[in-house]
Image: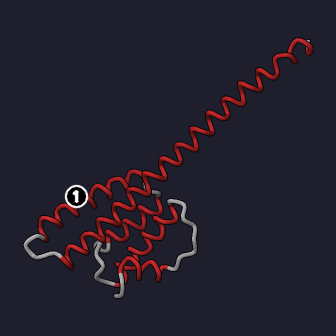
Amino acid sequence: MLEKIIPYLPFVGLIIGAFLQYFFTRQIEYLRSLRELKSKAYMNYLNGVCELAQITLFCSPDKIPEKKSDSFIKIADAKARICLYGSSSVIRSFSKFEHLGATMNSNEQRNAFIEMATKMRRDVGLRTNLLAEDLSWVLLGKY
């Protein structure tokens, strides 16, 4: 009986190997796609916030309402995608920042923003040891 099964074992091994390769390739592609969607959503949000800050500082007063409106649309789109694709820790820190008013008027608000940006970096796979103070200087400048 065993002699009848032995010739078919390589064929069974080939089928199992092909199935495992297909399964793991799909899983890797799914994770890569999710990381890319997260990265784009996080980046679009940070770009929108920075754009809004630049408009307030450098635009002529008559152009500010129109440009602010465009920035708010970009930020709202990014927020929706963060809620859809973001990790729970990022959404929690995002919620904390929004609860504080989503502005940079106090140290608590700035710290919440930097915490959120740090969690976004960690969520997309950046594991470098980055000081929150350095990130604060780059994103917010001197306060």
What amino acid does circle 1 point to? Answer: Ile
Q: Quadrant of the N terminus?
A: top right
Judge whether 63 appears above or below 32 on screen.
below
**Where residue 58 appears, x then y in whole percent?**
19, 78
Which of the two residues, 121 or 101, is positioned nearer the viewer here?
Answer: 121
**Where residue 116 appears, x then y in whole percent?**
42, 69
Judge whether 115 appears above or below 6 on screen.
below
Which of the two residues, 110 or 34, is positioned nearer the viewer here?
Answer: 34
Which of the two residues, 140 or 103, is positioned nearer the viewer here?
Answer: 140
**Where residue 85 appears, x then y in whole percent?**
42, 52
At 82% from the left and 21% from the top, the residue drawn is: 9
At 41% from the left and 79% from the top, the residue drawn is: 138
At 36% from the left and 87% from the top, the residue drawn is: 142
Q: Number of numbered discs present?
A: 1
70 with respect to 4 (left or right): left
Q: Which residue is mark 1?
A: 73
7 with respect to 53 (left or right): right
37 with respect to 75 (left or right): right
Q: Quadrant of the C terminus?
A: bottom left
Quadrant of the rendered image containing residue 13: top right
Judge whether 81 appears above or below 113 on screen.
above
**SS for callout 1:** helix
5 with respect to 40 (left or right): right
